[in-house]
Amino acid sequence: MKKKLLKKDYIKIYTYMLKIRRFEERASQLYGMGHIGGFCHLYIGQEAVVVGVLMTIKNNDSVVTSYRDHGHMIARGLEPKRIMAELTGKSNGYSGGKGGSMHMFSKENNFYGGHGIVGAQVPIGTGIAFTLKYKNQKNICRTYIGDGAMNNGQVFEAFNLAALWSLPVLYIIENNMYGMGTAVNRAAAGSDLYKRGESFGINGTIVDGMNVFQVIDAAQKAGDFVREGNGPYILEVQTYRYRGHSMSDPAKYRSKEELENYKLNDPLEIASQEIIKKKIASKKDLENINKKIIKEIKDAADYALDSPFPADEDLYTNVYL
Amino acid sequence: MPSLSPTMTEGNLTKWLVKEGDLIKSGDVIAEIETDKATMEVETVDEGVIEKLLYKEGEQSIPVNSTIAILSGDNNEEEENKDLPEQPKDNEDSSISTNNIVQKSSLKEKKQNIDTSLDENLITMRQAIRDAMAEEMRKNESVFVIGEEVGEYQGAYKVTQGLLEEFGPKRIIDTPISEQGFTGLAIGSAFKGLRPIVEFMTFNFSMQAIDQIINSAAKILYMSGGQINCPIVFRGPNGAASQVAAQHSQDFTSWYAHCPGLKVVVPSNAYNAKGLLKSAIDDDNPVIFLENEILYGYKAEVPADTNFEIPLGVANIALEGSDATIVTYSIMVSKSLEAAKLLKYKHDINVEVIDLQTIRPLDKVTIIESVKKTNRLVTVEESWPFASIGSEIVNIVQNEAFDFLDSPIKKINSADVPMPYSSVLEKKYLPQVEDIILAIEEVCYIQ
């Protein structure tokens, strides 16, 4: 069923997308200042994917994704300040400073990571769906897969098992056109990633991931299909990341023109134009939202920077239960 | 009695499909034989008339290579099966034709086996492992078994025999040959609250899934700051079986023991296999449970009490002694005990044998206390020597009991090469009782 968007939904869409972007910009700044270390993969450019899906979910659904996870956590409703605290390695981050950018979790919000090994989250998400079915729960598990992981063997093992046992898992391929520095067409034989479940009997579809409204419609349909007990489904969402693969990537493998071209279709622009066109909010209203978000994210950064580092003895906790 | 599996030493004659006086042709099925792994049909190669059946139906524990029937027209009255061509030995591999296998070994049959043994409390290690799983599954709906051939086939090594009948396909789950996929799936299901028992047909195949075991299962609690735990058991045969060569014979103990977040358990007999496995299934952490295939058929007295558990992390002093200590685990416990017996006879020295039972967490106290008493130490294990469990124990002991040592520690391992196929080389590769005796003599300065 096509989702009917209310006025508050439009505001929610814009707010979440903008929050993710402002958060990532601030994270980038803190990385540059040395407050965030290690690998840090930003979500800028891809906001419409996770926010579009967000609009179609039920609260107790589970989510699992790879290491480009900050946006997913914000969309899951987790607190930006505690995400930022994790990025800065502080004790009140979601993983107590032990996980970092790539390994964040919130069990109470059914967010199961944040996984650093390409493809590993796919059998795991399939297993979460296995539990849902085992316990006769009506929820589904949304398992995000990068285009790079679509060439990883365990993904196909998981597809086979999900189809074999008709598990309630929605696979969402976030195709941002590059697996690290390798363009999809240099890595994947056959361009239609969403068709890669066909031999297992898994249906799939593709959608423009720069347009949040199209993502909502496609995700609603795909989610309903899985929720109705039809087994797995694959939704490919075509998107683009504006930044490099990680903070340390100069992105020399693509042209400036290509990037600028995508920016003409900026997901935030598309959303705001639609909102203004529909007279749901004025440019000024949106600017006010922006100001509020900038403050919230600045507060989150301050919170993170003011937070204590883990104590030495924390090194040895949480190895065994 | 044909040898129909790599580790088969004896077989049960489940059924004759021919009678005396029958004319048989090459390819006829003449009997059903229960091996240590399955019930198989046996075909004849030679032709003639069955003159005499030497064993009755239902007779058990007939040694491999015994004559079971005599065929007339067979010039030298050779036994029926002697000239059988190479039977498929590896019935855990897909190479065997399915019509050769009768999947009728049921829980009931198994119970009969127990009843016919001399002591009713003596059960094999494979039965003990099966019982441990069944008891825990009865207690907790969240426990399930997943792996290759665990259900309809009744277990590639007959360990899960009868479980499908009792618990059904929802909880005894046959998988495709996709170790990485089903291991990751089981781990995800554990994140979400189930308690899977993952059977690897052998631990050699766990290498296909080791990323999920280490990077997902072992690290999740730490990475999530204590939010998400992974209550899961990975179990299956580990180490050398019998002539299955390089890719199917390897001891993975030190691979897994290396990793924080995992517990590693190494039973040495039916008794501790049951008690330890029940603790492992109850444990809220990922546990690697390494079974030795050779030990599957060995019997021991095992309590029937469904609450019987042996805590993880506690070693067992299998034999008390005062002159030297052997620290060992898994199949090398029985070899060490045998060596200790011979050393007593030969030199009247009393060797203490410590069966570690769990490698991680390691019971250091029992090791140190023993060394303080005997002042001499030999470690014995099946794994390769480099960075082995013995290497770690040597480090612990030199650190914590240096002044108590009267001689350098001896470390016994397999040869530092891949496992060869030839039986002669295989024996040479593996630590033998004589090697253990020599090492004890050396640390005791006995010429």
Image (cartoon, coloured by chain):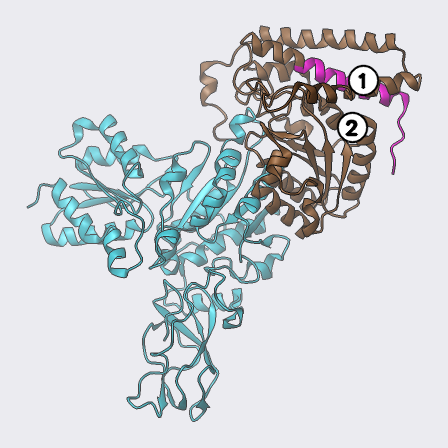
Chain colours: A brown, B cyan
Q: How many marks?
A: 2
Compared with residue A269, is residue B298 higher up or lower down, i.e. above or below?
below
Provide the chain ID for the residue under circle 2. Answer: A
Q: Main secondary structure of the magenta part?
A: helix
Tell which of A271 and A189 is nearer to you. A189
Residue interval drawn in magenta:
A1-24
Identify the residue position indicated by label 2 in the image.
Answer: A52
* Res A267 → quadrant: top right
Compared with residue A212, is residue A219 higher up or lower down, i.e. above or below?
below
Are the residues flagged by discs 2 and 1 from a single subunit?
Answer: yes
| Tag 2–tag 1 contact (CB < 8 Å) | no
What amino acid does circle 2 point to? Gly
Quarter of the picture containing the N terminus of chain A is: top right
Tell which of B217 and B404 is nearer to you. B217
Tell me the number on the disc at residue A269: 1
User: Where residue A139 appears, x then y in whole percent?
Assistant: 74, 39
